[in-house]
Amino acid sequence: MLLFVVGAALSLAGGVGVVAAREAVHSALSLLVVLGALAVLYLTLAAEFLAVLQVILYAGAIVVLFLFVIMLLHAQDPERRPSPVGAQWALAVPLGLLLWAALTYASFGLPANVRPAPRNFGAVESVGRELFGTFLLPFEVASVLLLVAIVAAVVLGSAPARPRVTSPRERVGAGDRR
Amino acid sequence: MTVPPQAYLVLSAALFTLGTVGVLVRRTALILFMSIELMLNAVNLAFVTLARVHGHLGGQLAVFFVLVVAAVEVVVGLSILVHIFRTRDTVDVDEIDLLRG
Amino acid sequence: MEAWVAPWLVGLPLAGALGNGLAGGRLGKRGTALVACLSVLAAFLLAVQAARGLLPAEVPAVRWVGVEWVAVGDLRVLWTLQLDRLSVLLALVVTGVGFLIHVYSVGYMADDPDYARYFTYLNLFTASMLLLVLAGNLLVLFVGWELVGLCSYLLIGFWFERPAAAAAGRKAFVVNRVGDAAFLLGLCLLFTLLGTLDFREMANLLRDGGTLRGHPGLAVAALLLFCGATGKSAQLPLYSWLPDAMEGPTPVSALIHAATMVTAGVFLVGRLWPVFEAAGQVLHWVVAPVGALTALFAATVAVVQHDLKRVLAYSTISQLGYMFLALGVQAPPAAFFHLTTHAFFKALLFLAAGSVMHALHGQIDLRRLGGVGRAMPLTFLGFVVGALSLSGIPPLAGFWSKEEILGAAYAGSPALWAAAVATAFVTAYYATRATVLAFLGPARDPSAHPHEAPPVMAWPMAVLGGLAVLGGFLGAQWVGAPFHKYLDPVFGGHGEHAADPWTAVMGVAVASAGVAVGAWVHRGGREPHLGALRGVLEGQWGLEALYDRLVVRPGRALARLLAESVDARGIDAAASTLAAAVARAGGAVRTWQTGNVRQYAAGVLAGAVVVFAYWVLR
């Protein structure tokens, strides 16, 4: 119970941090908090293997990647410049609340009490058996997907930067004149 | 197990909503990406909860695949982002509107 | 005799047409000509065989029944072909004269680059015409009817690079459509009345004492079918396409527009004789007057034509009028006798005219011809024989058939007889005029060097000349009139006209007078002024102006109205308005596509909320 309350509070705070932080670095660090808190919550839900994966993959790899890119694209703050769309707060908050209400309403269909989890549920062995049994084909497909992603990253990363693209409006105009 | 599964789901919904708001409100492409990660994680939490409720490992395996996809998405997305930054010198998604009709 | 002959008769020329149409370019001229001529010759021999098979008096009509074609409700139509004495007679004329003209064409078209196309059309025409005459029911006949119309259109417009030829083909097609529409209506009406389109069943239903005899609907059907016949046979009021049809190659004019296709209307009336006979007074009050009037009208117009082929075209219209007159006065054997002799002498005239054209590089204007006969004795002889036969000078073929028609007309009504006799005079006059102006007198074009036709063209003319001389004896009373005996079973005793020597003498006298007057008036190539009469005749008794006012100008006005108002302001405007509306709508909607990812995301979220709301509130 205590674990859940702490985890939930931390993850919510982290979530707000991700959305509200001014600096991208702060957002990334807030995301790290969320991921860690969720890993704890996975433990309470008998998903040990996923908790480990969460820490290694998400916290270890993805967030680090984010941090790298943040450093690469030297810090900018686009939010202060005017935008044709504006911040969309007036649109986002009411719609978000509606969505949350609907999702919450939907979750009330579940039984209140749950039987104790069987032994080994969520352990490496049981997840592995399932993964290499029933889900073998999706697993292999996922490996192909990863390969494609690697190739894509290499291609995108190594392509020379094209000359600066002018405003699309001008290009359309030129096309019309031709 | 004293915490009802609804609590987890409500938390998941809240995190998902937070991520949504982030996508709608923030203009820095990186933060937009992180908001999407937040939404993915909210969904993951719902998966794990339901796997526990139904006593079925399918939910946890779905999370596994979501992890894979998330990793792929971040890799490709960030490469595109870097590429855009190199050609257009911006990470503001509002300035990237080449597909305007 | 066996029924298999019938499909072969149609199939052989059709095979020739297919062979030449698909492989004509690769056969060479000699191969093309061989395929075309031999297929028609084979059909001719088959027709002779069929005619001999039918000679014994008791042999009934032979029918060949092919596959079922139409089966809708009560209507069952089979591909039926019928070999009886009438259809075999026509088949003989079509294949016999057709073969001669095929051979003639080999020489006439020798220098034309579209040799194979020409013979493809010609063979296709022969096959279509045979389908028409051998048809066992009215719908199959209609198929042949439309196919010969198509071939006529194709051959009139054979030299379609010439605007006049293309326009003439179009005119022939359009004018024929008017008649064909009436034909189709008559066909439908006949079916609703009789419940069948089969000729034999029709004849059985309309036999003496049948309940439908004299039914008014039958008269309407007969009238409509006769309208179809006037279109195909160029009778008043649908005659105007035939003179223009002379734009086609001359052998085509000889075969299609003189000897065979234009007689299809006569054949139609003969084939549906039971219907016309049972239809009350249609024959007497419509067919005979139309025939007599057309005969006289076309003959007078022929007098002032300057184009040799047009003279012959109006002459054809006039002679077809004679045939309808004979049908109208209940003498169908006389009509078909004249059809046969006319096929001989008119084809001969056309081939002789074609020979002149061939020698003089297309020169056909009577004002510029003259003295050609000295250089082309054989052609000259052929033309003279044809012209005298056309005039009805004994003992040539035209005399026998024309006298018979005059006699029948005399028995029918004095007025009709008077018109027929007057026509005979004018006919002899214009035939002589054409002969004199073209072949006698001084040569008016010193640069022309006419030469006699090559043998491949001369021989068909010689054979036709022999037929034009001797063909009439087939119907002569003193040799027993074998022609009429042959047709007797078809028309059941309608051939019995007591020969009236007085009408024969009168006819010969009038014809001789026509020849004499013509020879004297035009002696030495002279052409009288005729004053106002010439204007009237050249204007076709005012019919041309009338058609112009009634049909052409309203048609043009309607077309202009449709083009300028309905099309430009109605249809085009609607299309442009629609296009502009689409463009405006697109312009309005394209602003939604901002290219801004966050706006799209907001849209997605709104949609998700709506879906959830529906799901929750359901």
Image: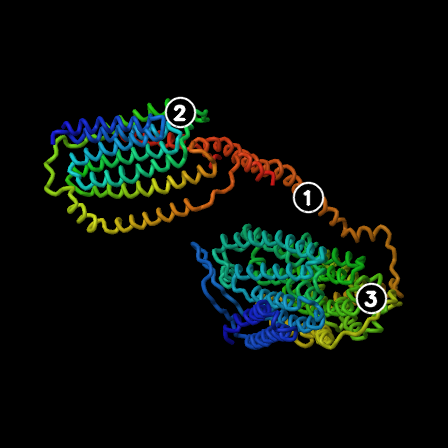
What residue is at 50 percent from the left and 69 percent from the top?
C63
Q: Chain of mark 2?
A: A
Amino acid marked by disc 2: Ala
**Disc nearest the viewer among 2 and 1:** 2
x then y, percent, for residue C423: 76, 60
Left or right: residue C329 compared with residue B28:
right
Q: CA distance from mark 2 to mark 1?
A: 69 Å
Q: Chain of mark 1?
A: C
Q: CA distance from mark 2 to mark 3?
A: 101 Å
Report crowding for label 2: few under 14, some 14 to 19, many 20 or more residues within 10 A (C-alpha).
some
Could one spot residue C263 in this view of the protein?
yes
Q: Nearer the viewer, residue A21 or C138?
A: A21
Left or right: residue C11 compared with residue C431:
left
The residue carrying mark 1 is C556
Which element is circle 3 on? helix
Residue C406 lies, with reference to residue C461, above or below; the image says: above
Which element is circle 2 on? loop
Amino acid marked by disc 1: Arg
x then y, percent, for residue A129: 17, 49
What residue is at 20 percent from the left and 51 percent from the top?
A132
Q: Quadrant of the C terminus of chain C?
A: top left
Could one spot residue C400 in this view of the protein?
no
The residue carrying mark 2 is A87
x then y, percent, for residue C141: 55, 61
Numbered badge on residue A92:
none
The residue carrying mark 3 is C438
Question: Going from the N terminus, do you reach mark 3 or mark 1 first?
Answer: 3
> Which quarter of the picture shows residue B65?
top left
Name the residue furthest top. A90
Report crowding for label 1: few under 14, some 14 to 19, many 20 or more residues within 10 A (C-alpha).
few
Count of numbered marks: 3
Q: Nearer the viewer, residue A118 or C164?
A: A118
